[in-house]
Structure formats: C-alpha cells, structure tokens
Image (spheres, grey):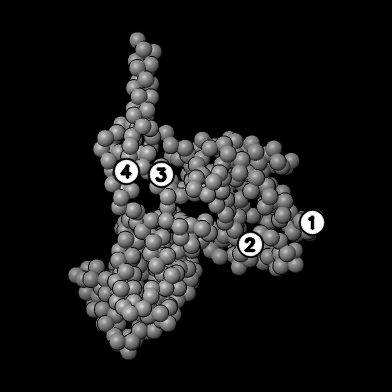
Amino acid sequence: MPNGVGAVTIHRQKSLLKALETAEELRTLERHVPVPTFMRALNLARSERAHSRMIAYLLSRDDIAIGGGLVRELLLWAADQLGTEDPAVAIRVRTVAESLSLAVECRVERWSIDVVAEVVSPAGSILLGIENKIDAPERKGQLAQYQKRLGKECGERTPLLLFLTADGREPRTSAKGTKVPVVSISYREFLEHLNVVIQDRSRGGAVTEVVSNFQRHIREEIVGDSHVKGLVLDLWRRHPEAMRLAMKYRPRLDDIKEVYLEALQDGLDEELLIRTYPNRGHLREIKMTPKQWWDGRMPLTFMLYSPDAGRPSVRLLVGNPQFEKHKDRLQAWAESLDKAALELPINISFPRRGWWHELLRENIEQGSEDTEPVCDEDTAVAAADKVLAWLESLRPTIDPFLEEDG
C-alpha cells in the first residue's frame, strides 16, 4: 500500500510540474530580457559594495544638483519616520534638511559602515550613516555597533543611521534607547526620492546617463519589474502546488557541496581545512584554507558563497580575529603583491565587511550572458577551477612567508 501511495504522489508531482512547464506565463517569463545596465554588464547586479559606492556618488554630486537634493529628500523622509518616536531628533534633522544650503561629504566603508555622509548647513550638521543590505543578513549586534560608533564620532553633529534594504525590513540588531536612531528604508522608497530629485533638477536639461542607468537598474534588479511580478503572481494563483514544489526542490549549495570539494581535492595534493555555514538549514558558505597556509600564519580563506537570490560567487577573505593576530605579516605579504604584478585584482587594503576582510570577489559565470548560474555540477566545477587558479597565482607570493616559519 505505501509503495502505491508513493507512486501516486510522484505521478501527481510530475503532472503538476508538467502543467507548470507548459504555462503561458512561464514561457513569457523565459523570453524576458533584463534591461542592460552598467551594474549587470560588470557582474555587479547584486553587489552591495558597488551599490554603496553608487549611492555615495549620488549623494556627493553637487555639480549635477543631485547630492544636496537627494540628501535633503532622505533627511526629510527620515524626519517624518521619526515623528512621534523621537521628536527631538526629528526636529533637528528636519531643520538641517530645510536649510537653503547643504554641503555633503561622503566616504565609503568608514568605520565598517557602508556609507557615511557629513551633512553641513547653516542650521546645523548631521552625521548620516547608511547601512546597505541587498542579500546579506545582519551579523550579530551589527547595527548596535554602528550606532555606538556614530554616537562616539558625532561630536556636535546629530547622528542618524539609515538601514537600506531591498524590502525595507526592520533591523534585528539595532539598539533601543540610544542617541543614534535607526530608520528603515527600502530601495523602492530610495528610488522614489531619487526620481523626485531628478525630475526637479532636469527640467530644460538632460538627465545624466549614469543616473538614469542606475534608476533602471534598481527598478529591474532590486525593486522588480511590475509586469514580471504580475506574471509570477498569475503563476502562483494558477499553479500553487507546482510552484511550491519548484521552490522546495530548487538547486542549492547543499546539492553541489561534494562535487565542489572533490574537484578541489583532485586539483590539490595537500590537506585542506573545510568549514561550512550555517550548521543548520541550507548552506550559504563553503570555506576552504590550505592547512599549510593556516599553520604558517597566512590564514587566507577561499569561500564559495551562494545567496538565495543572485549569482554564486567565490571570495578571498581573512577573518577579522586572524587579521588582527597576523596583521603585520599579512600587510607585508600585501606589499609584496605589488612586485609580483599579479593579474588578480586583489584589494590589498584589506577592507572589512562584517566579520571578514575581503580581498577579492568574483561571480561564477557559465553559459551565455543571459543564463543565470544555478547550483549544478557545472557551477561546482567552475567555482573549483576559479579557486585553483587563484591558489596557483598566489602560491609563489605565499611560500616565502611560510618558509620564514622554518
């Protein structure tokens, strides 16, 4: 009896998926061509760092009358959100925003915060932090740490932290009752403010291509195309069981873990230290370090990362505790990279991204440019090949430092 029930269930599941496969809405979605943008062309469509740099650019471009206007829009909006929750701060923020003259100076990755802007006006100054999240989750205590730092550094300036996310979700790691309020804002709301500024400033003139291109990118990649969303909604309405099956069994990093690790081990005749994260639920990270490097106090980590949305990527990282412990050695190695003239675009400034210092990140590319990589065997092999190539390039620069340990 159980076997018969199982056969019926499998047959029903196949029928559901067959109906989904032939759905007209799905055929239309498959013909959808994403809008070409600079971010997509550079494989940075979901890169938080690239978006943060673009936001800092927009906030500080006074020569095209965007910076001051955009900062003003964001501050007025933040003041409205603070409203009754923190009226004293809301009044100070609004007073600065309504000043006739605003001077804005932005820095990226300051105090580990994605964007920090100093806004100066005749009515006062604001130290504005923007923490940008697209796919990455908050790490433990992250926003509380940023609140503390902004409060320490603000001096006479009014401190404020914006939490920018794809969906405008409320933060989980912020602290209550501090002098640094946190205001959540979605990319959709950010885009609306940017649109207002561009419309107000572009009458009689052309909107710069870089700004309009970024607007298209946000609509397509982050906010979502309304027509495409409608097609997906119709699919869920007409084929709910099949869609749930597709989501349940969609390819994940768990499915290619063994293939990836086997490909690495086949290409390396040495012992590897392997760690995965998280320990429960679906994998997002597979971390690997050659044991010889770790024992030799060169703790470089290669990570295969796969978010729930977006392209899988390979990263070269150093954990913050290991960086602090071996900082002198790592920086000496970084200086030697200049002489080695490697083709790898390694960031030898060791920028900190949460728990990690990230030296290099590249998306995994496979197939045609219109095909999104998924977690299949080809992705696993492509990721392993990339890591092996990086290892081969870096090994001559690492070996001299390992030899010093005798």
Q: Is residue 48 left or right of residue 4?
A: right
Identified at 50% across, 45% down, the residue is 371
Q: Answer yes or no: do the residues labelled 1 and 2 have beta carbons within 8 Å?
A: no
Q: Nearer the viewer, mark 2 or mark 4?
A: 4
Residue 170: image location, x then y, percent? 31, 58
Disc 3/disc 4 C-alpha distance (Å): 13 Å
Q: Is residue 72 shown to the viewer in this render?
A: no
Front residue (pair 63, 280):
63
Distance in Å between CA atoms under marks 1 and 2: 25 Å
- The alpha-carbon separation of the residues under discs 2 and 4 comes to 39 Å
On residue 345, the disc is 2
Quarter in which the C terminus is drawn: bottom right
User: What kind of element bears circle 2?
Assistant: loop
Q: Residues within 10 Å of mark 2 (few under 14, many from 20)?
A: few
Whole-number angstrom distance, CA of label 4 to CA of label 1: 57 Å
**Which residue lies under the disc numbered 4?**
232
Q: Nearer the viewer, mark 1 or mark 2?
A: 2
Q: Which residue is mark 1?
A: 403
Q: First in sequence: mark 3 or mark 2?
A: 3
The three-letter code of the residue at mark 1 reads Glu
Q: Which residue is mark 3?
A: 31
